[in-house]
Image (cartoon, coloured by chain):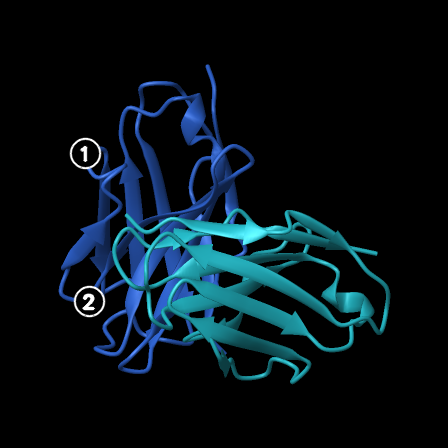
Chain colours: A cyan, B blue
Amino acid sequence: DVQMTQSPPSLSASIGDRVSITCRASENIARYVNWYQQRPGKAPRLLIYGATSLHTGVPSRFSGSGSGRDFILTISSLQREDFAAYFCQQSHSVPLAFGPGTRLDV
Amino acid sequence: QVQLQESGPGLVKPSETLSLTCSVFGASVSSKDYYWTWIRQSPQKGLEWIAYVYHTGSADYNPSLKTRVTISIDTSKNQFSLKLTSVTARDTAVYYCARVGNNGDYVWFDPWGQGTLVTVSS
C-alpha cells in the first residue's frame, strides 16, 4: 500500500506570507497526488489534482508541484480564509490514501 | 451545482451494522463518467477511503475494511449506500460521501457531502 506523510504537522504564518507544505509518498506515484483544504467543521475541498492542476474555481495563489515521491503545495500570499487544514491524497493505487494533514494557523 | 447529502443513524450499538445513504442532487449516479465513494474521518485515523462504486454496481474496497463493508448503488433513487458490519468504537467517525471525478488520467474526490457523525456506543 502507498503511504503518505506530510510536513510540517502544523504551521504558523501571517496574512500575506508565502507558505509551502510537503507531502511524501512511500513509493514512486508519478503525479497521482491531489490536495484538499478543510476548514473547521466543513468537508474537505479539492484544490489541486494530478499534482499540478488547479481545480475549477480555486484561487491562483494555490499551486502544486512535484512528481515521483515528493510533492509540494504552495500558497503564494496567505489570505484569512486560507487558515485551515491541508491534506494530500494519492490516487495511484488502491487503497487510495490521505496524508495526516497540515494545520495552518495564524 | 452538484450536491451530496448523507443520511442515517447518528448512533449505532457495538457489533451492529452501520447503514448510511448518500443522496445526489444535480447529477445522476447513472452517469458513465463518475464513480461514487465513501470516506470517513476520525481523530485517530485521519481521513480514510472506504470504497467506491460505479453505476453498474462494480465496486472496489479498502482491504482494511473489505470483510465488513458493502457499497451499493440505487439508480432509481439517485442514491448510493454504505453498510459496515460488526462495528466497534474504532468505527466512530464523520462519514462523507463524494463523487469521484476524473479526466482520463487522474481521479479525485469532488464534491463532498457535508458529512455525518456516526458514534458507536451502547
Residue B19 to residue B31: above or below:
above
Q: Which mark is residue B67?
A: 1
The residues bearing labels 2 and 1 have C-alpha atoms spaced at a distance of 22 Å
Q: Tell me the SS state at disc 2.
A: loop
Residue placed under numbered mark 2 in the picture: B55
Residue drawn at 33 percent across, 55 percent down: A96
Left or right: A61 in relation to B89: right
Residue A28 to residue B66: above or below:
below
Q: Give x and y (percent) for residue A58.
A: 61, 80
Q: Which mark is residue B77?
A: none
What's the chain of the residue with tag 2? B
Indicate the quadrant where residue A93 lies. bottom left
- One can see residue B110 in this view: no
The one of B12 and A27 positioned closer to us in this rendering: A27
Camera-near label (2 vs 1) is: 1
- One can see residue A100 in this view: yes
Left or right: B87 in relation to B66: right
Residue drawn at 51 percent across, 45 percent down: B116
The amino acid sitting under disc 1 is Thr
Q: Along the polypeptide, which appears first: circle 2 or circle 1?
A: 2
Local crowd size for mark 1, using a 10 Å CA cut-off: few (<14), some (14–19), many (≥20): few
What's the chain of the residue with tag 1? B
